[in-house]
Image (cartoon, rainbow, N blue to C red):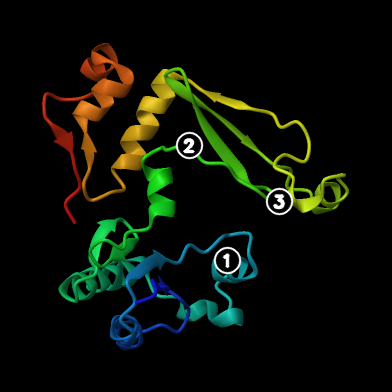
Amino acid sequence: MTDINIDLIVGLPLQTEESWRYSVEEAIATGATHVSVYMLEVDGESRLGREVLAEGSRYHAGAVPTEDETADWYQMACELLNTAGLRQYEISNFARQGHESRHNLKYWRRHPYIGFGLDAHSMLPSAGGAVRFANTDELDGYLAEESGPLRLVSEAPAADLVGREAAFEESLFLGLRLNEGVALSHLRRDYGEALLGTRCPRSKSFGRNI
């Protein structure tokens, strides 16, 4: 079967518990191997966000579910998907065995990646840390480059250097997005015993229970 991912958003205007359950059950019924569930974040600078803050009625701003409703419906999705064999392996991601997103796992496990295209970001490991850089986010300048849109870097990017301590902290908060948690043996291997001893309790791993 071809791998298919379905993205679902919980907390949309006019969404109800019944309509949300229907969406999740229909996603399961497709036989998709991967489902992502995201809770709507209303940007205060967006048209919907401004209307919500003003307690207006445009864009169905008055029908945005409450935070408690959204959290309850997210939990409902977790239970329905896990029962259907789509195991939750990350805060927002569920997959049938062997169909976890290799693309996203690279970010959560801090593996190196190269971005191609407008505003694309890259991360390469360095001694004990990492180097991050990004292509320009200005479309006109990007398209005007001699090499065109396929060029890796449209102009010399400003590199952000991630030191050992910051890389260690990233490994923790990114790894804790995963249900498998963070193995202290991996942190010890990558960052050394001294840093590990000052930041982590004496246990084998950190994990999340959802």
Marking on residue 49: 1
Q: Amino acid at mark 3?
A: Leu
Q: Position of residue 34 (x, y in %)?
A: 34, 69
Q: What type is the residue that disc 1 sits on?
A: Gly
Tell me the CA gap for discs 3 and 1.
26 Å
Residue 169 in view: yes
- Relative to the observer, which residue lies in front, 59 or 25? 25
Q: Position of residue 74 (x, y in %)?
A: 29, 69
Q: Quadrant of the N terminus?
A: bottom left
Residue annotated with mark 2: 112
Q: Is residue 46 left or right of residue 3?
A: right
Where disc 1 sits, the SS reads helix
Q: How many marks?
A: 3
Tell me the kind of residue under disc 2. Pro
User: Dot 2: within a 10 Å radius of its alpha carbon, few (fewer than 14), some, or many (20 or more) residues?
Assistant: some
- Report whether 202 appears left or right of 14: left
